[in-house]
Image: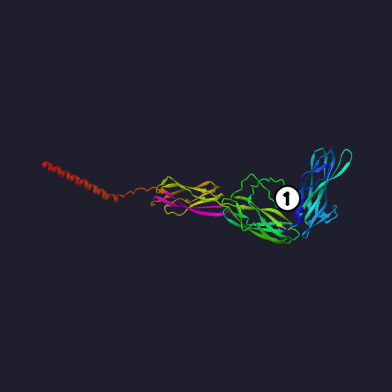
Amino acid sequence: MRSIPILSLLALFICAAVIPTAGALSVGEVHFDKMPFSLGDKVNLSIPIINNGDKKSDVVVQLQQVTFSGLMGKSTFVMSGEIGEHPSSKSIGILDGSDGLGDLRSGEKRIAHFVIYVAPDATGGIYNLNIKASYRNAFSSKTEMLGTISIPVESSYIIISNVSDDVIAPGSANEMTIEVKNVGRDTVKDVLLEVGTISPASSAAPSTSMMPGSIMEMMGGTIPSFGEEEEKVPPISLVGSGNRLYIGDLSPGESCPVKVKLVADPKTKKGLYRLPVTIHHWGGSSSDSIAVRVISRAEVSIPEIETSPREVKPNTTATLLVTIENNGGDAARSVRVDILENRYLAGRGAWNSAYAGTVAPGDAGSAIFQMTVLEGAPEKLPIAMKISYTDDLGEHAIVAKKGISVSQVEEVKSPAERVPVLVIFIVLVLAVAVLGFYLYGKRVKK
């Protein structure tokens, strides 16, 4: 970026927001709702007034615009004078130019409140406001100049007007489109989009800097934070050769789409993350952030199935219990288990389909079936099941195969099959009997 006089003025005036003057009253640290101001802004201003001397009665604090430093081409110009003597008086206004604080005892501090308005067609630059105070003391009435406040106004107004494809899943890449638009009334030169480090939206630690964040950003600094260890692997990373994307000049009303490719770590948790961006251009810069939504997937499996009884007898009713586990990062919703066609299984009605509902991440659910194992089933009967469910990524279906034990009953022979055995037994008995009578007869003859 080029060396720009107005940025030097910004740093100088903002870091020393109030130039105090000698007097019995002094000004503390001035606070704005936002900084710098943009076109059309209405901003609250708080000014602490401290009484360093004797008691002051009927203290009234006033704001008056006196000077203006603006841009003309690529240089600065300065105008000065009381309100109404130059065009800048139409660009910025003080909705109520005075605030009565009442009486101030010695050492007492009170806050004077003002509202400052920036016109939509204001000229960009530095607007200087004098702080004056009038009061009565024990001897007379006095008016003091307490200091000067310098207010930067951005008329070159570049915004993020649209973001598309801002959803990404863990372990995947996605190309996001960021649309940058000039909503100001002047052409903005040398626009550049800088993408920062992505972090969870809920993990922002409070700043430990004494300087307001908006001022730090304008000066190109960063705000340190402590108390959290940085992750070794960022949850979301920018893919590409660099994080500074040159856009060029933007005319009033002109916009430009910028594509940014992101990749999410497989362990990234579901939630909202922030993509910080800074828009640099000739004359200044502005910071913003874009929400990136990380959606997660369910990982469903069937670790085991059980039957009651443990060994199923053919032609008897048995209960089949199917356990469904979810080891993913999202809930598995509308979980249903269907037993695929099996010639050894039968049942009544829609016996082969069971609804398991929702299975939360890290949890387990179950599906129960009543079935009958038919004759001829093998000792280890394989069963194929389809598990269907939905998660953030849509509808899914997987097939799992498990087995059950079938008792093998010995065959019972029919009466016709038992006849030959009986005949053989009778013949043997008769043969033994005949042999016995023969041997007995021989012994009697002797």
Instruction: Report the number of numbered marks.
Output: 1
Q: Residue at x 51, y 48 (%)?
A: 325
The answer to whether one can see residue 39 in this image is no
In-front residue for pair 43/241: 241
* Position in image of residue 28 (x %, y %): 78, 43
Residue 82 on the magenta segment: no
Residue pushed farthest front?
3
The colour scheme of the drawn protein is rainbow
Query: On the image, numbered disc 1 is attached to which residue?
Result: 215
- In the rendered image, residue 383 lying in the magenta stretch gets the answer yes
Residue 316 located left or right of residue 243:
left
Q: Nearer the viewer, residue 84 or 324?
A: 84
Name the residue nearer the viewer: 340 or 82.
82
Q: In this view, does 79 lie to the left or right of 380?
A: right
Give residue 105's quadrant in the image.
top right
| Image position, residue 209 (x, y; %) | 70, 46
Quick one: 121 or 19, which is closer to the camera?
A: 19
Looking at the picture, how far across and down is residue 365, in whole percent?
A: 52, 47
Q: Secondary structure of the magenta portion, mostly?
A: strand
Report the magenta residues as a range.
Answer: 377-404
Can residue 213 be seen in the rendering of this structure?
A: yes
Quadrant where the image shows the N terminus: bottom right
Q: Quadrant of residue 256?
A: bottom right
In x, y percent, where is residue 155?
76, 56
Kindly identify the amino acid type of the residue bearing the numbered disc 1: Ile
Q: At numbered mark 1, what does the secondary structure look like: helix, strand or loop?
A: helix
Within 10 Å of disc 1 (Cα), the crowding (few <14, some 14-19, many 20+) is: some
- Name the quadrant of the C terminus: top left
